[in-house]
Amino acid sequence: MTFQLPDLDYAYDALEPHLDALTMEIHHSKHHAGYTAKLNAAISGTALEGSSIEDILSACADSPGIRNNGGGYWNHCFFWESMSPSSSSAGPSGSLSEAIKSAFGSFEEFKSEFKKAALTRFGSGWAWLCMGDNGLSICSTPNQDNPLMNIGGCGDTPILGIDVWEHAYYKKFGPGRGDYIDAWWNVVNWGVIEDRFNSASQ
Ligand code: MN
């Protein structure tokens, strides 16, 4: 069994004008495809060959090739599913909306704290919204690490993540990582995030 690059549920230009088509195409067909191929090569012939990606990520801390490419594979699958051309700019509803107010005070305050985590991640990495025993929390990881690896104090169940590698925004936004984050809110698929939150809350 090998991992496959997933198709997107929308066209490369479907997230315009917020995320540009060329960035989406390169990000999916080059970067994500590269992580997928390198993950398959890295686990080939090892004890992790045939394991689920979740099992691989929980056991990869000491294997840089599997850690970087397994994280890259999973993170981008999660990222594409987190976005939609028909996002609701009003944000989440229902129990997730209530949990955000409980944890952060308001949706606007949540967005401010999440943006801060994404902006202050030095170099390449990700920012995450996670659900755990103590409710919602925000954390960030370097490179292609993620909360499923449970290293570096970021280990609850991720329900939303933003890629802040320069390859995710530089063509359109240049060094303006904050402008990219502001635009990205317009394409978050809150229905998917609510489903993840409800699963993680059970
Ligand atoms: Mn990326």
Image (cartoon, rainbow, N blue to C red):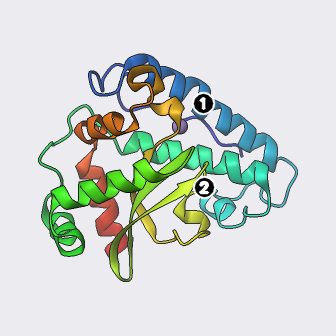
Could you tell me the amino acid type at mark 2?
Asp
For this rendering, which residue is in front, 153 or 9? 153
- Provide residue 37's location: percent of width, then percent of height: 71, 35
User: Are discs 1 and 2 less than 8 Å apart at CB?
Assistant: no
Residue 60 or 118: which is nearer the viewer? 118
**In terms of secondary structure, where does tag 1 sit?**
helix
Tag 1 residue: 31
- Choose top left, top right, bottom left or bottom right for residue 111: bottom left
Kindly indicate the quadrant of the structure image that contains residue 50: bottom right
Ligand 1 near label 1 (Cβ, under 8 Å)? yes
First along the sequence among labels 1 and 2? 1
Residue furthest out toward the bottom: 133
38 sits left or right of 71 in the view: right
Check disc 2 and report its element: helix, strand or loop: loop
Find the residue positioned furthest to the right: 45
Residue 82, picture quadrant: top left
Residue type at mark 1?
Answer: His
Dot 2 corresponds to which residue? 145
User: Taking 106 as reference, is 113 left or right?
Assistant: right
Any mark on residue 122, and which?
none
